[in-house]
Amino acid sequence: MTAPDVTELQAALLAEVSAADSLDALEAVRVSALGKKGRITDQMKGLGQLDGDARKEAGQALNRVKDAVQEAITSRQADLDAVALEARLAHETIDVTLPPRPRPGGHLHPVSQVTEECIAIFGEMGFTVAEGPDIEDDFHNFTALNIPPEHPARQMHDTFYLEGKDGAAQPVLRTHTSPVQIRTMETSKPPIRVIAPGRTYRSDSDATHTPMFHQIEALVIDETTHLGHLKGCIIDFCRAFFDIPDLPVRFRPSHFPFTEPSMEVDIGCSREGGELRIGNFGEGADNWLEIMGSGMVHPKVLEYGGIDSTKYQGFAFGMGIDRIAMLKYGIPDLRTFFDADIRWLKHYGFVPLAVPSMVRGL
Amino acid sequence: MKFTLSWLKDHLETDASVNTIVETLIRIGLEVDTVDDPGAKLAAFRVAHVIAAERHPDADRLQVCTVDTGEEQVQVVCGAPNARAGMKGVFAPAGTYVPGIDVELKKTKIRGVESNGMLVSEREMGLSDEHDGIIELPDDAPLGAPFATVLGLDDPVIDIELTPNRPDCTGVRGIARDLAAAGLGTLKPFDSAATVEGSYDSPVAWAIADDDNACGYVVGRHFRGVTNRPSPQWVQDRLRAIGLRPISALVDVTNYVSIDLGRPLHVFDAGKLKSDTLTMRRARDGEDFMALVEREYTLDGEMTVIGDGDKAEAVAGVMGGLDTSCTEETTDVFLEVALFDPVSVATTGRKLAIDSDARYRFERGVDPESANWGAEVATRMILEFCGGETSGHVTAGAMPDWQHNIELRTNRVATLGGVDIPAARQAEILDGLGFETETNADVITAAVPPWRPDVHGEPDLVEEITRIHGFDEIAPVSLDRDTALPPAAITPAQLRTSRVRRSLAAQGLDEAVTWSFMGRAHVELFTDDPDTMDGLMLANPISSELDAMRPSILGNLLLAAGRNADRGFADLGLFELGPAYRDASPDGQLLVAAGVRHGNAHPAHWSGAARAADALDAKADALAALDAAGAPTTNLQVGRDAPAWYHPGRSGGLRLGKNVLAWFGEIHPGVLRKLDVRGPAIGFEVFLDALPDRKEKGAARPPLHLSALQPVRRDFAFMVDAGVEAGSVIRAARGAERDLISGVELFDVYDGKNIEDGKKSLAIQVTLQPVDATLTDEDIDKIAAKIVAAVEKATAGSLRG
């Protein structure tokens, strides 16, 4: 028996493969060629009747046919798959203008964001954050800050007092963050370099005052810090905070009981067209905006804090967080800060991923 | 403190312009509030000469004038009948704003003739209603000079906001002294020793009662035969310029000396005094006093008065009395020049709510020596303005011992003030301010002048020297750090707070900052024990809605949610991270993260119906906060014992050991009703102080073991009593085979069709993570049986078939 001619078989099968116009038809071709009773399989079974070299030769030929057909099927299958996918996708369509499902997204209050901005800047200068209670005693809020009992600031029209318990001294709501200076001095040794942001309270309520507001305090105590450092620190802060490298900063002599010498600090601004803008508006611009009080810590304050005023000295300053937030972000009305109007919170608020950092820019 | 430029120049020899003076005042710490320059508005109006005036060719009543402005000759068409050649008038060029008629002049043609400005009337300048003709000036009026100068309207008024430490600058002379020291001119001499001899003995004497009152020393002088006519025009002009109303010579003298030298005085009509001795004494509690402003005040025993017999005729340092005040008929006068304790005057003035020029000065502390020289200055003026004669002076008490020296180490100006100033210059500045200095080696000994009670020690002298030298001369020095890189600025607890804040915002809540106060009526809704709130009531609240420190943040957030809902924004979530108060001690202040959700948690949307926020949203918020805070949220115990402001059946607590970390749930409808907030609303409170301190374990995480073996998942549904908590099913399932069960998820809660009343079906999916080898079907069946047994035992339920 001679080896069968497989050329015809291959041609026939390949023709059937190309003619298959669906995956089902292709599968039928595959079964008819390569299945258990398929034509190639049949021929394979017949090889046993051949002998020697002929069997070997015929076997190889059949295997080539088998490979060729298999390859053709795979290729045809890919083509048919692609066509089928295309046909399916042609029916799959959405309205891309549909609003997507809402994802939650809240905001941080400007006071929180600005506080963290301040921390980021002062942090670079080596300050750490100190804290103190809102309800203070007379000593920390007044006496230790060299504010005598008769000082007008201690009067009921400026300071909130709690009713207190019988016999005990009336607690006060801290009128500034300065008592944290005293608490820091009481619990740590120089060198001291802290900032203290927090809520403060004054018995005031009008267009530009609210009974509660926020301050940030800075305190530096060591053996060598002088007025030049105070100026440098404040200038560096103001320029970084407002992101205006040439922001003019002016220091005016003033008076506070807890500092000596004392300075008020102004920054350059323009009020042209009734709009307040912070910045450098050139020589001769005489528009200044006061933003903080500062000075060298009064020796009596150091002594009240338990620090030797003959050895140590330093500076302190304090400013309104709400106020610098208003100036930087163009928020017109202080009272709106505390109203929790959802429209305001979303408009002036900050997304939570915007973490202030000097390295990344505020 | 208001004064005019010309008044300042009484004391200061200077050529400086107003602008320079103002800049210098600000530079040396005398904050200028306003500068009102009445001349500035009129600067364009200048003296002009009318060279020719001819009839307008086309108008009978108009003249065409040629006007010499001093700089050029211009043609002006003028309708005034008195315009004529040779006269001097006031000319405003084109471009000038004319205040009286509110017009900006333009170059124009009037009936065909060019007109380049205006010759103005008094009404046009806004000076009066006079409009019969243009202003006529004397022939010697200087051509081209500003009209304001000719009119005496060029005296700018400067208003200084005085810091409380500068009593010396409550007088014009003190301000002049500061300016002179700052190099702006020379302080003119003032003879404080000149005395006026009296011609008779005063019939009125002083006494100071021994009752610890506010007066330490007082000088008096009697005058007789005076005529209390109006004071001279220049005195009236000055007082008027700074907003004071001239009254009569005697009263004007007291005001003038007060402003000029910072020395308050009082004059009694001696004819109206009932006794021959005026006594400084404490007021009686409830004593009545009729002040010269014709208002009755009730005094108390802390206040000092000047008694005439039994009656208070002045409140010391604050205000005189009506009954002995000077009038036009006054002929005999008794002058009071006293020293009063600043604190007493301040307290009394505050209690009586009287802001007087005297109080303004006494409460800052007047120059003690002025009791003596002030009496002399006033005496001279009274005699000059009113005639008559004066007695010798009478006194009581003693001049206080005010002299003291301060030593200044000259290097302190550099080491504290940050600027190198030679010792000689330091001494020069102090001398200029009236200190008497002596320099030995490196120390300046400075005798403090009596008008500077604010100067106590070395830092004060450093301030005086640096402020006069100029703070601008201090070179800024940036802060150095001890380390190349900054240490962490915030503590782990502060970092935790920041993370909680940002995490809550990421949950879709908007951060609010609300008052630390709330109203007492609302406080009681948010505390278990209202009595503890007694110590947290404000003694002087600004309103009854803000009269207590808040025991919880929730109340304010709920009220805010209500306000937003009333505005039409009902679907919202708010949170606040801030204080709540348990008592008035530092430890009684808690740091709390609280939030509320109101309305829909998910709005109506095409992808699904709206869903109202529920208690489990609050639980999720609380857990998110705790997670951000680093709390072990998988190990918390959930309880149902939230406080009374939560819905009793829809609320819970999260505990770690004994510590309550959070409450969450629906807000009690009764609480919402009392807050007048339409519900429902949900809320949570997370107590950040209750969190355990994070243990420092370093940054490294524990090793991650990834199993090569596939996890296996099996579902179970249990029929349990309706009251059985899902947590007990999950807990029991999880505990059934701790080593292999890596997760239990509750995926169905069902109590509808096919479930008998009082029961419910809970379905869980359990994940088995093989450890050593793939689990066989047999293994899995064994574990499943354990899970079923454990859940059935824990819940008395049964596996659903």
Image (cartoon, coloured by chain):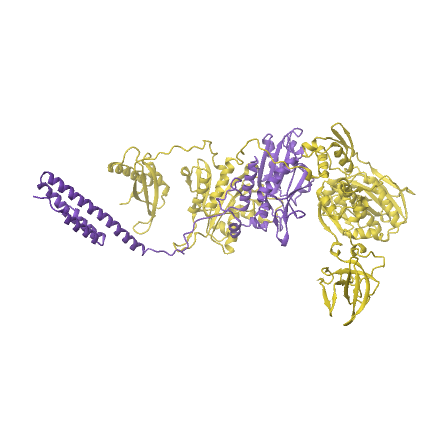
Chain colours: A purple, B yellow
Q: Quadrant of residue B147?
A: bottom right
Can you say whether B427 is above or below B278 in the image?
Answer: above
Q: Residue at x 85, y 40 (%)?
A: B191
The quadrant where residue A120 appears: top right
Point out residue B384 in the picture as x, y percentages from the top left corner: 88, 48
Looking at the picture, does residue B215 appear above or below residue B606? above
Horizontal and vertical percent for residue B91?
Answer: 77, 60
Query: Horizontal and vertical percent for residue B175?
Result: 76, 43
> What's the residue at 57%, 33% (across, down)?
B481
Task: Tell which of B422 and B577 is nearer to you.
Answer: B422
Q: Nearer the viewer, residue A96 or B579?
A: A96
- Any part of residue B313 in sight: no
Q: Is residue B41 above or below residue B254?
A: below
Measuring from the top left, give residue B227's x and y in whole percent: 88, 51
Left or right: B599, with B189 as reference point: left
Left/right of residue B100 with respect to residue B512 in the rendered view: right
Left or right: residue B528 compared with residue B184: left
Give the residue at the far left of this rendering.
A1
Mark yes or no: residue A187 visible.
yes
Left or right: residue B782 versus residue B257 is left
Q: Residue furthest top?
A: B441
The residue furthest right is: B199
